[in-house]
């Protein structure tokens, strides 16, 4: 599991040129709630883990936060420096696990679609060490959700994934909006944080063939897919979308914002 995580987390740098425009924007209400729940104010110091090209960094910096953005991919870090030029952001090319501080200096640690890539054996301890007393940890992602009555394209496309040997395992979840996992138990089990809030945000994006293939080309599983399988999949997506009058599909997105406050007196870690 650890080897797979380490291998896949490095694939994103190959899609550095695509990531900023291909990935969906996080909804503005998510950032507003983040600031409300944490009490962050312009000028506060924030550490962002796995910043990529600045997808979440940009809206946070525009709200006046001073951000240290840690990004392990050299190409993604270079794109972030360009995208965030003129804003109060320092981009550091490093894994969070290898970063050298400063410690105890930040009002918040945030991770957007990146927390699950950090080593689970150390991520809560590292985040707590980075934060000043009373500081907050905020994590969220952007995941595929399946609204009731939503686009059937994804059901039909599973036949293609199965045919090329890239199908989902039996019983793989298909969460509806509001049904993405709540990680409160894991956060509390660290003994280092108290959960403040868990809130769901859902939205949809329409894609034409070019846009959807650019999106898929930023996903670790598709980047790592053998080229012949990927080409067959992409050709089939183009063919099927060309037969639709609109030429588009509608994908449901969901994010779960977890906000937790650092405990001043840590509890023993749950087993």
Image (cartoon, rainbow, N blue to C red):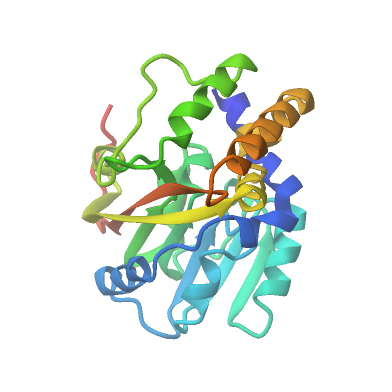
Viewed as shown, does residue 136 lie left or right of 61? left
Q: Quadrant of the N terminus?
A: top right
Residue 85, position as x, y percentages in the image: 69, 80
Would you identify the image quadrant in which residue 34 lies?
Answer: bottom left
Q: Is residue 162 above or below residue 22?
A: above
Q: Residue shown at 29%/36% (left/top)?
A: 269
Viewed as shown, does residue 251 lie left or right of 254? right
Residue 90, position as x, y percentages in the image: 64, 73
Residue 267, position as x, y percentages in the image: 23, 43
Pick whichever, 19 or 65, lies toward us.
19
Q: In this view, does 120 lie above or below 39?
A: above
Pick whichever, 154 or 20, lies toward us.
154
Q: Residue shown at 63%/61% (left/top)?
A: 20
Residue 154, position as x, y percentages in the image: 47, 34
State how many labels appear. 0
Q: In which quarter of the image is the C terminus?
A: top left
Pick whichever, 255 or 21, lies toward us.
21
Viewed as shown, does residue 237 lie left or right of 37? right
| Residue 128 in view here | no
Pick whichever, 258 or 234, lies toward us.
234
| Residue 32 in view here | yes
Q: Residue shown at 64%/76% (left/top)?
A: 84
Q: Is residue 238 above or below residue 108?
A: above
């Amino acid at each position: 599991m650890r080897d797979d995580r380490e291998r896949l987390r490095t694939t994103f740098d190959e899609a550095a040129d695509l990531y900023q425009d291909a990935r969906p924007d996080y909804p503005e209400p998510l950032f507003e709630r983040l600031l409300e729940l944490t009490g962050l104010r312009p000028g506060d110091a924030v550490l962002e883990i796995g910043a990529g090209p600045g997808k979440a960094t940009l809206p946070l910096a525009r709200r006046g936060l001073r951000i240290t953005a840690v990004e392990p991919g050299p190409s993604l870090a270079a794109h972030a420096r360009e995208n965030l030029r003129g804003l109060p952001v320092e981009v550091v090319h490093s894994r969070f696990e290898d970063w050298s501080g400063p410690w105890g200096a930040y009002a918040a640690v945030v991770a957007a679609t990146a927390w699950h890539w950090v080593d689970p054996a150390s991520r809560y301890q590292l985040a707590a060490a980075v934060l000043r007393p009373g500081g907050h940890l905020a994590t969220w992602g952007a995941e595929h959700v399946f609204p009731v009555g939503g686009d059937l394209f994804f059901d039909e496309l599973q036949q293609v994934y199965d045919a090329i040997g890239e199908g989902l395992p039996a019983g793989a979840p298909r969460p509806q909006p509001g049904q993405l996992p709540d990680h409160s138990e894991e956060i509390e089990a660290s003994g280092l944080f108290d959960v403040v809030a868990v809130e769901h945000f859902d939205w949809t994006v329409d894609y034409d063939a070019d846009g959807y293939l650019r999106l898929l080309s930023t996903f670790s599983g598709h980047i790592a897919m053998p080229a012949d399988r990927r080409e067959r999949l992409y050709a089939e997506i183009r063919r099927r979308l060309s037969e639709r009058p609109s030429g588009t599909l509608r994908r449901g997105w969901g994010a779960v914002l977890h906000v937790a406050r650092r405990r001043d007196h840590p509890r023993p870690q749950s087993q």
